[in-house]
Amino acid sequence: MTRRGRGSTGPSRPSALPQGTYDPSRPVRELPDGRMVVAFHGDDDRRRVFDISRLPLPGWHQPLAAAVAERTGPGGGLRTFSAATTGWGAQSRLVKFLASLPQPPTSPDQLTPDHLEAFHDHRAKTTPTTALRDLGEARMLFTLTSLRDKVTAEVLDHIQRRLPTPRAPEPATAAPDAENPRGGEKRLTSGYSDGELERLLAALRADAAKVRDRIRAGEDLLRRFRADPLALDERDRVLGRMLERMAVTGQVPTPAAVRPSPFCPERQELAGQLFLRLRDLSPLMMLQAALSERNGETIKELPVRHRVLEDRAVELVIVKRRRGARRWFETVTWEIGAPGRELHTPGGFYLLLLELTARSRQRCTSSLLWSVWRNGHGAGLGVADDHYAPFQDSLSCTSVLPTVWAANRSRPLLADPQPSIGADGASPVTAAPGLPLQVSFNRIKTSMEVRRTKRMDGHLPSAAKSNTMQVLFRNYLSGDPVITSWAEEVLGEALVDAEQAARRAHEQAAQAAGGGPRVLPGPGDADALTEGGLDADTARQAAEGRIDTGWTACADHDRHPLTQQPCQVTFLDCFHCGNCLVTRDHLPRLLGLLDALAQRRRELSDEVWWQRYGPAWVAIRQDILVKFTPAELQRARTEQPHDALLDLVENPWELP
């Protein structure tokens, strides 16, 4: 294959092909010693070999190896090291359990539904949290083409039944102790408050700045030593000579006047002059997670390969797991920011991390960002120094412990003080002292999701960044105390704004239509209405109910105050009109209308309800009912009609 680049293909011009035939390596292999293994190479570029021969029941080995290869192959569902390892564990437990039975099925065709039921019961008794997961993995295994034709139809029917819904586990609680004085749940998953997040980010930036300044100071001393050693004083010259040796060989010498020891702490400090150490990972990784608003798994697998766009942004391909087959990789663009602001922008901090890890990465030749120096004796390698990528083979690295980092800081991070409640449940008068802040990647991710959602005014389509709207709400926003408090505040402000808008709409409509309803709180007879200011003829008609509308009465239906024409507005608009008359006899119907409006409020959104019914509700509550005594309202409540007639004044297509 020699033709490359633009123009190498085209119409009537076949594509260049490699010479020879392509013979892909088979995942199922039989080794010379007779063992049967399955080779795995995942989408995360991690590898493992599963030894089928170590399992019991030799009659299962051949079909099981083919099924494992299919399950972990390019078209299977287990395409990462951790997923394949978890699936292999479930498959191994199933075969080992079958072998422990008094009469084990020696081959797949002897498997029965009773065997699977017994396996589920056994797992439910020993480890109930993974029982359904193991049964689900067995379902996926037996439905593959490698095993589907080798088990009975009864087994296939049984395994494809709907699995029982797992019950939500009870929250892990603990009695109060020294680490958890208030008791209750030990591990928090909710986000941080605004104050806690600001303190955490400040601590992360402070520790990241120390690492940056330390390595840059060592690089500067090395540069000056190489340029002119005689220009340095004796102390810097000695240190520069050791840094030169470290830069060339990657080995960290034992400082002079220090007793040689495999675990010499002075070697750790000297290594930190040029190399990133394991203890430095926690603050750097958490700060990158906060700036990029990504989870810990994505931060662990950040690549070295990137592209700088006009010195303004950096473009790279990141990994977002659990998105389904062939949907793991995403191209992102991170802002670099102004010089000196690299601790505040994701792109600038990413480039800084490339600088800090450059020397160790040259030694281990890793394609991932994170490369560090570690004491080989402490890792049990039998050598003094080792440069390695901690997440190259697995995402599990026990040295990255955010909680340990927070606890070992000289200035501890504290959570917000919690109010102390007395035994009688009285209101708190003092606040309990702040406890150590629980730090984790999950809480940082949740806090950043909450902050972005608030910045987008709660608009989930705009706030969804690395997850769908459903995942964003279910896993990050729902139940979070910060977003709940913010939502209640926003909702309260929105309700106040809607009520004020309805009040203004009612006042404007009332001013344009004669000043609003005329309320005559006395009895509804003709003499009382005449004393209230009505002429004798109108008072008589009102007393007899001949000018009643839906819920009130109209003094002059033929002349609307605004148009001077026959009235054509709905009965709900009567509450803003100067021709509207309200007496004590109208109270039962008005109270019934309020109940109907309350029912509509449960059926419609607040925005629609306030726009459609808000002005009338404000007029009834604030302009009419306040003119009557509580006794009159209580008496009217007993005479309230069952039908409020609200459906008769609306178009059918407007009904909820």
Image: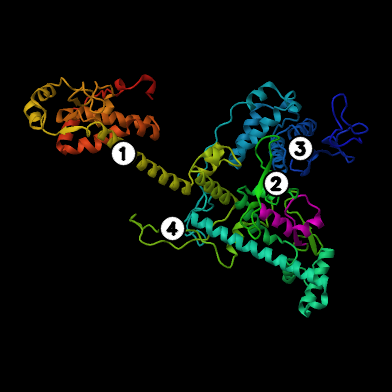
Q: Amino acid at mark 1?
A: Arg
Q: Please tell me which residue is depicted at 54% across the width and 62% down the height of the picture.
A: 413
Furthest toward the bottom, the residue is 234
Give the magenta part as a residue range: 347-375
Going by the image, does 27 lie left or right of 508?
A: right
- Amino acid at circle 4: Gln
Residue identified by numbered label 2: 315
Label 3 belongs to which residue? 56
Would you name the residue on which mark 1 appears?
A: 504
Picture quadrant where residue 272 is located: bottom right
Looking at the rendered image, the disc whose residue lies closer to the viewer, 1 or 4, is 1
Q: Is residue 254 visible?
A: no
Whether residues under marks 1 and 2 lie with C-beta atoms below 8 angstroms apart, the answer is no
Is residue 355 magenta-colored?
Answer: yes
Apparent side of residue 105 relative to residue 230 in the rendered image (left or right): left
Q: Residue at x 50, y 40 (%)?
A: 459
First reached walking from the N terminus: tag 2 or tag 3: 3
Q: Quadrant of the C terminus?
A: top left
Query: Are there few (<14), some (14-19), or many (20+) residues within 10 Å of tag 4?
Result: some
Local secondary structure at mark 1: helix
Query: Is disc 3 placed on a helix, strand or loop?
Result: loop
Q: Which residue is mark 4?
A: 418
Q: Give the Cα separation between the discs numbered 4 and 3.
A: 56 Å
Q: Nearer the viewer, residue 5 or 139?
A: 5
Q: CA distance from mark 2 to mark 3?
A: 50 Å
